[in-house]
Every structure is written in structure tokens, then in C-alpha cells.
Image (spheres, rainbow, N blue to C red):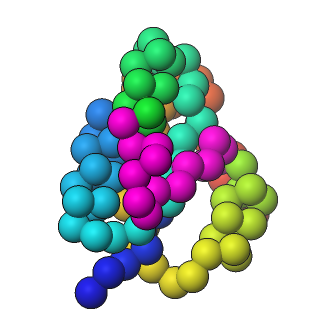
Amino acid sequence: MRVRVLVTGAAGFIGWKVSEMLLEQGHTVVGVDNLNDAYDVRLKQWRLAQLEGKRGFEFHRLDICDREALRRLFEQGSKGAAEEQGGRGAVRNSLLHPCPLAP
């Protein structure tokens, strides 16, 4: 059974490898990443370049803290699964810049 999977942090190492594996298995991957500069953005761009153009992959540059943008993305897609790999590049950065709490 093929599934449409939302992978957050798709340009990070784990999100990239998970996306690659899912695509190889024939699933559709909706990759999301804000491409922050926690480490060299060129590495993230290189990883995305390895995924872009592969059948079943689409990428959206957005921050998962932007709840409205994430809601719109969910509304335009069909039902599927989510693989959460998004996060700040360092614990300290997460503490200094957390996502706002849901209302």
C-alpha cells in the first residue's frame, strides 16, 4: 500500500534519509523544512537536490511553527501519515526560540 507521508525536517540528515527510503518504497513524500542556518544551509540544499526530481517528492519551505501555513498544507493534501524529524539544530537554540504554544 502506497502512502502519502509528510516529512518535517526533510533537509536534515535523518529527514533526508527517511524521505529517500520512503520514495524508494514507492510512497509519496511531502517534505517540509525551513532551511534555517543552524548549520551550513548548502548541505541542506544539497540534500534537497538529491530528492527533488524524484517521482513522488514535493518540497515546501516553511517553518513548522507557522501553524497557519502548516494547516494550509494539510488541507491541500489527501490523508496520509506524518514523520516528524523537524526541530532546531541545537538544544540551546530550541530553548531560546521555541515554537509558540497552541492556543
Q: Nearer the viewer, residue 26 or 99?
A: 26
Question: Could you say which is closer to the camera, residue 95 or residue 71?
Answer: 71
- Count of numbered circles in the view: 0
| Whether residue 94 is situated above or below residue 57 in the rendered picture | above
Query: Residue 10: x percent and y percent?
Result: 43, 44
- On screen, residue 100 versus residue 48, left or right, reads right
Residue drawn where x is 40% and y is 19% of the image: 43
Q: Which residues are magenta?
A: 50-65
- Res. 23 image quadrant: bottom left
Rendered-image quadrant of the C terminus? bottom right
Q: Is residue 29 left or right of residue 58?
A: left
Residue at 66% of width from left, 53% of height from top? 101
Residue at 49% x, 52% y: name it: 31
- Percent of width and height locating residue 40: 45, 12
Q: Position of residue 41 (x, y in %)?
A: 50, 18
In the visual, does 61 lie left or right of 27? right
In percent of width and height, residue 45 lies at: 48, 26
Q: Is residue 29 visible?
A: no
**Residue nearest the viewer, comparing 88 with 22:** 22
Considering the image in quadrants, where does the N terminus appear?
bottom left
The residue sitting at 43% across, 74% down in the picture is 4
Please, is residue 4 above or below residue 42 in the view?
below
| Residue 94 in magenta stretch | no
Location of residue 26 (image quadrant)? bottom left
- Asked whether residue 28 is in view, the answer is yes
Vertical position of residue 16 compared to residue 20: above or below: above
Question: Is residue 61 found inside the magenta-colored segment of the image?
Answer: yes
